[in-house]
């Protein structure tokens, strides 16, 4: 857990002192453990969030371990940690060569290398990062800022940011039930446009909502089993607002290491008393809660998790988390952005799958994955919680409300989700999911997690993943490659987002193309750079 320090050092200096202390472990491992733990506690929250692949909490607790465990850590675990720490010792830009636009430069660098730039001019010191971006753009290894030329269906036409076109099987878009093309969804948008116009024209706390907003809150309350729903203009603001609206500086937050960025950012904005627990580890949550409550019985604790984790395609034991939260008078917040509507009985997501509808303290979600619109919500059991969040979540109070068209689209989507048609769409979606995962696995690729609308295909090395990404663009598969800061360095992957519009045959064909592109990328990098994978 991080704490407020009287004199904070710059992160590079702290990491340097941590490495220096650890390097003395051969002579005095216990003294080294104490110095390493003290340095780790000084690392800033921003560094922790960006360098999430470093086990900061383990380093902090090193001086609490038995002597034999300390010796084992330095002998077995620390060498790999040191290799990850070394690039943080000094800003990478101080040792980097002059900007080289060739492919080697584009493929070898990572975004983390530019996270701590050198120089007093905040604007000028962005230039080196821009040079790397330009090198990646010129070599067509930059996967961002692509644009659609038409609706994002199961097959789509896009252009990259060099205006190069591509058409292919679309696993890039988030439209799990393919509602974007549904005639009733589009008609709902047209009707709202005719009745209310295109703009909400105000905060939801003033006059930004419409009667459709009230209907949507009621429909969402029925879907998640929590009556008191607050709408937000986007999913990010819902997650951020749920945390900052309720948590104060003296309170505590336990958050899954892989929870969504809006929740991580909200936690840092709300309090410095943050513990990031091991992914999905309920017993770690229990131990942290016991430790916090032993020292503080007066302040609040919020435990935060995703429902479906969008990068790993796995989910927590929500019932166990809620039980342990009740035992220690903590509040559980679950983010159902990716699973609500697309999974579970009646589209009730992970909560419905675990018989937890109406049993979780707080639920938040986003409409941009399954409900064909921007927007988000927070749902609670109590009207008091709803009114408090509306007043003190700045991202609700000080933002314009959802537009009437967005609200109408989400309402119609929520209605369809609970019908036989919604069940049929989920059936089609999962037929494509299983076909894709089965074909990828048969071909020897690693599909992470469990079957869900997100199929993460682990690649690992960023140079390899970027090369595969370039090949896929030209071969008819539109797939989003994720790397740092979405994943830790060395853990890049393709996040394939499946739609109900995908046919199983398309999914199998995409798997074949991905497999061939991976093989060709390995051969190319071996020939051009001498890399082996």
Image: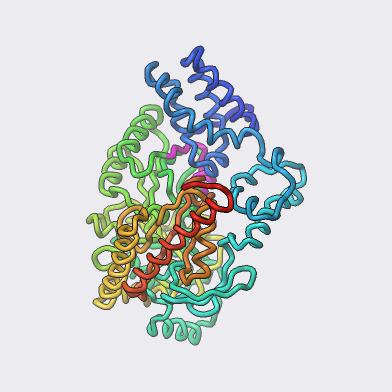
Frontmost residue, 389 versus 372? 372
Q: Is residue 222 visible?
A: no
Q: Position of residue 439 (x, y in %)?
A: 32, 63
Q: How many marks?
A: 0
Q: Which residue occupies 49% across, 53% down?
A: 262
| Span shown in magenta | 265-276
Q: Position of residue 305 (x, y in %)?
A: 38, 49
Question: At 46% across and 81% down in the image, what residue appears?
Answer: 189
| In the foreground, 314 or 459 | 459
Picture quadrant where residue 518 is located = bottom left
Residue 167 position, x and y percent, is 50, 76
Residue 365 falls left or right of residue 225: right
Q: Is residue 206 shown left or right of residue 62? A: right
Q: Is residue 66 above or below residue 2?
A: above
| Picture layout, residue 45 above or below residue 406 | above
The outermost residue toward the front is 527
């Amino acid at each position: 857990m991080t704490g407020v320090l009287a004199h904070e050092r710059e992160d590079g200096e702290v990491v340097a002192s941590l490495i220096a202390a650890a390097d003395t472990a051969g002579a005095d491992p216990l003294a080294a453990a104490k110095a390493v733990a003290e340095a780790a506690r000084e690392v800033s929250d921003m560094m922790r969030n960006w360098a999430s692949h470093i086990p900061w909490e383990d380093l902090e607790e090193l001086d609490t371990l038995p002597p034999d465990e300390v010796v084992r850590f330095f002998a077995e675990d620390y060498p790999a940690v040191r290799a990850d720490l070394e690039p943080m010792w000094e800003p990478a830009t101080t040792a980097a060569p002059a900007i080289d636009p060739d492919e080697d430069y584009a493929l070898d660098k990572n975004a983390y290398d530019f996270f701590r730039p050198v120089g007093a001019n905040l604007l000028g010191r962005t230039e080196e990062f821009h040079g790397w971006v330009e090198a990646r753009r010129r070599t067509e290894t930059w996967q961002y800022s692509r644009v659609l030329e038409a609706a994002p269906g199961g097959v789509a036409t896009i252009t990259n940011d060099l205006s190069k076109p591509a058409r292919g099987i679309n696993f890039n878009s988030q439209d799990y039930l393919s509602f974007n093309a549904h005639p009733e969804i589009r008609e709902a948008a047209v009707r709202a446009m005719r009745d209310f116009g295109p703009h909400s024209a105000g905060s939801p706390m003033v006059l930004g909502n419409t009667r459709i907003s009230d209907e949507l809150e009621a429909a969402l309350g029925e879907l998640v089993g929590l009556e008191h729903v607050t709408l937000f203009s986007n999913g990010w603001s819902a997650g951020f607002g749920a945390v900052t609206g309720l948590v104060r500086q003296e309170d505590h937050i336990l958050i899954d290491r892989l929870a969504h960025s809006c929740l991580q950012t909200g936690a840092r904005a709300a309090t410095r008393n943050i513990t990031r627990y091991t992914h999905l580890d309920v017993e770690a949550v229990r131990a942290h809660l016991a430790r916090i409550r032993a020292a503080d019985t007066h302040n609040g604790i919020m435990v935060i998790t995703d429902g479906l984790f969008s990068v790993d395609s796995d989910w927590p034991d929500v019932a166990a988390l809620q039980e342990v939260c009740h035992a220690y008078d903590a509040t559980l917040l679950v983010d159902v952005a990716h699973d609500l509507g697309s999974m579970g009985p009646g589209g009730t997501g992970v909560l419905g799958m675990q018989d937890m509808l109406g049993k979780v303290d707080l639920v938040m979600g986003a409409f941009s994955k399954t409900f064909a619109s921007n927007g988000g919500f927070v749902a609670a059991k109590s009207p008091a919680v709803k009114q408090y969040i509306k007043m003190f979540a700045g991202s609700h109070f000080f933002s314009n409300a959802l537009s009437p068209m967005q609200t109408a689209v989400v309402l119609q989507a929520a209605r369809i989700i609970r019908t036989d048609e919604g069940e049929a769409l989920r059936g089609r979606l999962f037929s494509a999911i299983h076909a894709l995962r089965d074909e990828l696995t048969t071909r020897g690729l690693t599909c992470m997690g469990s079957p869900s609308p997100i199929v993460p295909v682990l690649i690992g090395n960023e140079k390899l993943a970027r090369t595969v990404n370039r090949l896929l663009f030209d071969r008819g598969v539109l797939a989003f490659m994720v790397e740092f800061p979405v994943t830790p360095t060395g853990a890049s992957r393709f996040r394939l987002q499946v739609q109900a519009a995908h046919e199983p045959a398309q999914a199998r064909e995409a798997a074949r193309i991905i497999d061939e592109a991976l093989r060709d990328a390995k051969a190319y990098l071996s020939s051009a750079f001498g890399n082996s994978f």
